[in-house]
Image (cartoon, helix red, strand yellow):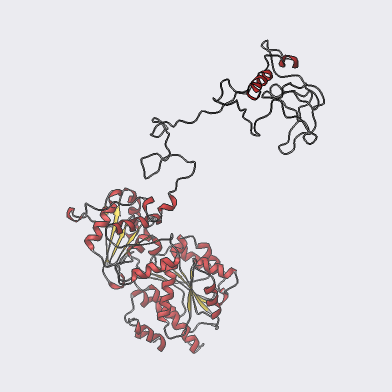
Amino acid sequence: MKYSELNLSPILTAATDKLNYVEMTPIQELAIPLILSGRDVAGLAQTGTGKTAAFLVPLIERILRTQEDPNHERAFKNWLPISQVLILCPTRELAEQINDNVIKIADGSGLKTFPFYGGTGYDKQKEALKSGLQFMVATPGRLMDLYKDNHLDLKQVRAVVFDEADRMFDMGFKEDMKYILGRIPRDRQFLVFSATLNFDVLNTAYQFGAEPVEVNISRDQAKADNVTDELLHVGNDEKPAQLLSILKRENPKQAMIFTNFKHNVDRISKFLMDNGIPAMGLSSLISQPQRNLIIEKFKAENDQNILVATDVAARGLDINGVDVVVNYELPQDAESYVHRIGRTGRAGREGKAFSLVSEKDIDSLGRIEEYTKKKITIGYLEDADIIKEFKRFPSEQRASYGDRFDRPKSGGGGFDRNSKKPRFEGRRDGPGGGKGPRTEYPPRKDHHKDGPKEGGPAGGAPKPQHKHGPKPVHAHPKPAGPGHPHPHAKGEKKPMTAHQPPKPYAGAGGPKPQGKKPVHSPKHHDTHPPKTASKSFRKTSSGKAASPAATGSSKSFGQTVKSLFKKVFG
């Protein structure tokens, strides 16, 4: 069926002719007439079959007919100047792409559109909403932010489109989609399109009053016929060499390499660049302006014809020149495999897809073959095609972003992952120790609880360790009693002043107050001395408690400290 048979408005006919829309694809031929009649549609088709035009062309036609004649059979009911069509998609890149398609197909019609997604400022988006839009292309998160800030009115939505709805569910947007559908009028037109649909998506549509007509042109096959895919059984450490050999053999004009891990994107890109193959990386680790710039460079005619990406680029990106896709790892879910290899073989062109399968990918392979209902052809590289000499695959820390995460932590031990040398010297051989000579540390200034050991540091006096500094030692011990506590084991305390009331001391050699032991608060100290005399806790050689007189003998600790003090200070 041809576009000329649709009897479109003159403005839209001119735009489609300019885009060389002549023959409709199967999904367009089945979906466009249903949408023009106002029916809800669930479209299921392989990637690269024109699903975007399948809903944009009839929606633009209905708006133009409504503006010309509100009573036209294709016109929207209750359409107002502030009414809108809402298109929701899972990724920022897909939002930009759909917005560009709206601009091209609606060329010359005066219809306005704008993309709404995170990672960019709110100011331009708020200004666009105030200017009056007919199309809003948005990701769910940013749309909800704008709605909750009262910048848009979802009650004015007359048609809603969920593009790649299953992917939005996989990314955790299910509750957001329900929130949005609950605030849109139930008499709106409901459209959902994807290469894969699951029951959960359709069940949500039914829950909010939609009655979509299922248009499924890929019931018996999940991938397009013009894509040849094969797998190579390799070891995990053989993947870099195999990847390099495939690209050298195929010599693609444009190629996309998919990995499951965003931290692998820079490593693969660096590996290819080091071996003379220009490559760019696309992942969520880079900012949105950088992502847009990379996609524009990849689409343009230049030497940057290899794009390494995570699944963020697998959904919806329409790049017709991609002739080779390589799966560095197989995706965890089978549907992502279909979308990955769907980046090639678009618009009727032939494409090739290669998957590097190691022992870690076996489970994913089983799920993919069960979903596609076919065995993937096993391929191999001739020995002459395998590159033997190449610069090695970079470790994670050697990638362009690795330096930021590779700084040794202060005070930490252990080994640096990129070096056989211990991060800190001074460990011993043997279990639990690293290699290297034992570090000689300066002798510890240990002091016995009863005073400094004999033979202190040469050339100096013993220095009692105390957090408040050395304490003066008095020549004559003062008797215990109120205001005069017994001398401490390391010397008598400083004389009490009017501003420093005495505190009882319960350590060895000091007075122990009789009766109930005082309780000291960590913030407030006792300010009253003990009211009664206390006996010493120090014991004699016989095991009995010694009297204060006994502790003051010539052999007592206090006299020893006094004599040492006199020798040093005179």
Residue 393 at what x, y percent from top left? 31, 52
Q: Front-most of 292 and 52?
A: 292
In this rendering, the answer to whether 491 lies above or below 127 is: above
Quarter of the image with the C terminus is top right
Name the side, left or right, on which 436 lies relative to 377.
right
Residue 80 at what x, y percent from top left? 55, 83
Quarter of the image where one finds residue 145: bottom right
Tell me which residue sits at (71%, 19%) in the image. Answer: 537
- Total labels drawn: 0
Q: Front-most of 113 and 563?
A: 563
Residue 401 at what x, y percent from top left? 41, 55
Name the residue furthest left. 384
Name the side, left or right, on which 138 lies relative to 230.
right
Tell me which residue sits at (68%, 21%) in the image. Answer: 562
Name the residue furthest front. 570
Q: Front-most of 278 and 90?
A: 278
Name the side, left or right, on which 101 lies relative to 320.
right
Quarter of the image where one finds residue 44: bottom left
In this rendering, the answer to whether 443 lies above or below 329 is: above
Residue 9 seen by the camera: no
Q: Front-most of 428 and 300?
A: 428
Quarter of the image where one finds residue 58: bottom left
Tell me which residue sits at (47%, 41%) in the image. Answer: 412
Residue 514 at what x, y percent from top left? 78, 23
Quarter of the image with the N terminus is bottom left
Residue 264 seen by the camera: yes
Name the residue furthest top. 542
